[in-house]
Image (cartoon, grey):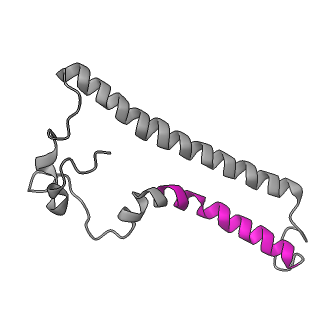
Amino acid sequence: VDPAGGPCINTKSILRPNLTSLSGAWLLPLVPLFLRALSMFTATASGGRGHPSSSSCSGYEKHALLNRLLFYLLIMLLRTYVLFVGLNFLEDVVTTTTTGEWYEEERCWYQDMLKGRKRRVNCYGRG
């Protein structure tokens, strides 16, 4: 915790804005699959030169890559809709039952903890 009373935030981090954006959260986990597919298809196109295992990619390898891609997409969809959307709704329901009021934009319990330009936006980060 920093002396100002808020959590410590490394403002010099290059990855933080990319990893916390929607495009970063969806595209970065797929980079290894795209690289694997690129290596498989370039090996097939070159007739196997430079590819240690075989002269061309087997149907099994392509099928495994497709299954892995679909599994990754399923996990990311579950993460997005169950964890983010669903748990935000659950938070609103719990807040409503404990306070007796639905969430209001004007009231934000963490507004005074926000730093810099984020403080100017009412309830920054609340989706």
Q: Is residue 98 above or below residue 57?
A: above
Taking the image as shown, residue 100 lies to the left or right of residue 90, namely left
Q: Is residue 74 above or below residue 40?
A: above
Residue 120 pos. (x, y %): 15, 57
Residue at 18%, 23% in the rendered image: 99
Q: Splitting the image into 4 quarters, where does residue 9 fall?
A: bottom left
Residue at 20%, 47% in the rendered image: 123
Taking the image as shown, residue 11 lies to the left or right of residue 18, namely left
Residue 16 pos. (x, y %): 36, 63
- Prevailing secondary structure of the magenta residues: helix
- In front: 120, or 20? 120
Residue at 41%, 40% in the rendered image: 84
> Quick one: quadrant of the C terminus?
top left
Callout count? 0
Residue 13: say if magenta: no
Residue range in magenta is 25-46
Residue 111 pos. (x, y %): 14, 47
Residue at 42%, 38% in the rendered image: 85
- In front: 49, or 65? 65
